Amino acid sequence: MSDFLNVIKDLRGGHPQLFANLAASVADPDAAGSNPGTMVRHLDALAFRLDGSGEIGLAAQAYEMAAALAGPDSSRWTLSAAEARLRDFCMQGRFAEAGPVIARLRAADANRLRPKITDALVDRGWLLELRGEAEASVQCYRLALELNGHEPGLISRDGDPLPKKIKNLRRLQLDMLIEACAFDDAVALHETTRQLIGAGPLACYDIVGIGALAGQLGVRYTEMRPPRPIQEPQLKFTEPPPPLTSEAGDLEAPSQYLALIDNCHAFPRSNLVLKDAHLIYDLAAHPRRGDVLLQDGVNPDQIVMAAFGTKQALVEVPEDSLTIEAGLSMFGLQSRNYGHWFCEFVPRMLAYNDPRCPDGIPLCIDDHMPPTHEEVVSLIDTRDRSIIKLPPRPVAFGLLGLAPVPAFFPFEMKPGRRVYDTIWPADILVDLRTRILDSARERGALSGRAGRRLFISRKAFAQRQLINEVEIAEALRPHGFEVITPETMTFLEQVDAFHSADLIVGSSSSALTNGLFCRPECRILGLIHANLGFNFRGYTSFIEAGGAQITFVRGQTVNEEGHAFHASYSIAPNEIIAALDRLRQPTSAAMPSPSKTEAPRTIFGRMIGALPFVPRNGPG
């Protein structure tokens, strides 16, 4: 016993070289002059002391010796040894050696230590993530998943499921590797954890706009409209023109085309199209690509993983693809959002209606779109095409038809870049407006009413809330305003409502893009928060293409959490009443000519002038 205790005392200083002597004593307890139970207690105390002093690897060895002596009662020390060994590997970054330890823990303990160790791994992963140590954080999360048996429900400290957390961290790492042109390293890194996140392998593709492949085998390209100038919008505010912080969009519209691509892959809810070794994506190939934060493969509803370099991108290789013989693309990133739908997707129908687009090819939309989106398609379609709703699976197309967004429209700019305020080409929008109004008339959907005054409610949305909406609505009622909630209406009901209005007040949101369908004499007050980077030019150019005029009323920002564009705000009702009163004053802004299908009304000015508007400082 004295020899054993002497070795224990020598080890109080934590000298690794003395463990060989201790191991010899443990191997022959009779020679050590002590019974195994006593030795186990001393080893347990030694391990506890070593662990407390940071000698986690030595503590694991002491626990392992105790387990060897304990015989049938060894489970406690076996678990303690495995737990200490796992912590030691994590502290040293020796994650590849942790697999056998995880297996021992899973085999030896079902419910006792495993949840505690799993929580400890998640905690360490979160700490490493906060420190910016992405790889170590990923490995801790990976080990937690393996220890947990990959059961669902394990989340990080900020509430994300661990597979999602690993995917997001991998994305950051891939971006850094791509920036260094280390594409092979990025592919190899992804391979180590792709099964944990349910992803396929990555491959490298050259980023091109469709025009770069025009004339190549399997790509037919037809220019529908050449580049052409865009009229600069004249912005109107109820205050002296404020110094906007956004970047004015380009005043030249890009080519509008129809492209037919043979034997390619596409991803619903994303804009990516893969053809041989090419990634076809006009936005990613744009000269301003370096300023744009591409969102494909990042948004929660994405079914593909992608990371973009300047000229090349890593994209998840399509697996388990749905096969479609032929289709025309009306699917993509943010297709569910009403504003994005109208700006980016609906204009494609003009190309698909063109005689140069073959008959009989179905229109393909995302299956998570609301019914109003499909209603829009049916109104514009002149070819009686069938519609295929695509589930969230990669699609192998025998033939895919593509048409572009009418203008350069980045989803988001990179941090530090100014917001790009896209200016929309009026010719495209006028054609859409005419087609939709004519189709609505043919269906008897336009009531013929005029002179309505609409206040657009946004109370159903959590973002960009008008905090005192109810107060404003009550202040407007005496002036003949009715409250509408567009999200509860069919698309044709929305078109009729906006087309019948002479005055509209509403938050500058997706619903306000319906101002395109207003009569030319309609006046609109677009309510918005105080952010000077907002896309005022975008709203103005889109709405005023139809002839209506929009004036912006900036309120007081209340809550700036999240995206700056979606901040909540309030506006004093008397400011809105005063702004409506000023709409009676003559404007120097040029008013577009009305559509050929409708005659201008001349009583609008008299109607507005007769209203009993409350003075600016009156009760609100």
Image (cartoon, rainbow, N blue to C red):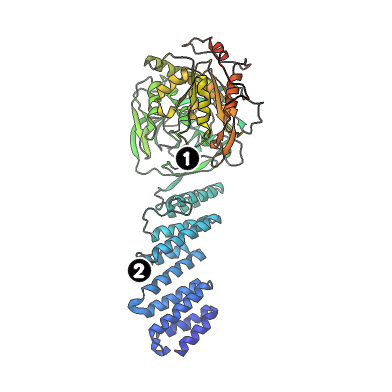
Residue 108 marker: 2
Discs 2/1, front:
2
Using the image as rendered, state which of residue 220 and residue 80 is in the foreground: 80
* Residues marked 2 and 1 touching at CB (< 8 Å): no
Q: Where 580 falls versus 461 (above or below)? A: above
Using the image as rendered, state which of residue 539 and residue 267 is in the foreground: 539
Density class for disc 1 (Cα within 10 Å; few <14, some 14-19, many ≥20) is many
Instruction: Name the residue at 48% across, 29% down.
Output: 457
Amino acid type, mark 2: Ala
Amino acid type, mark 1: Asp
Q: Which residue is mark 1?
A: 296
| Residue 43 in picture, x, y percent from top left | 45, 79
Instruction: Name the residue at 43% across, 57% down.
Output: 142
Task: Please report whichever mark, 2 or 1, sits nearer to the chain's N-terminal start.
Answer: 2
Please indicate whether residue 262 sits to the left or right of residue 538 in the image: left
Name the secondary structure under disc 2.
helix
Instruction: Name the residue at 54% across, 42% down.
Output: 562
Name the secondary structure under disc 1.
loop
Give the spatial CA distance, label 2 vs label 1.
44 Å
Q: Is residue 182 something one can see in this rendering?
A: no
Q: Is residue 28 something one can see in this rendering?
A: yes
Instruction: Name the residue at 41% across, 42% down.
Output: 303
Q: Quadrant of residue 240?
A: top right
Using the image as rendered, state which of residue 309 and residue 509 is in the foreground: 509
Using the image as rendered, state which of residue 16 and residue 443 is in the foreground: 443
Q: Quadrant of residue 231?
A: top right
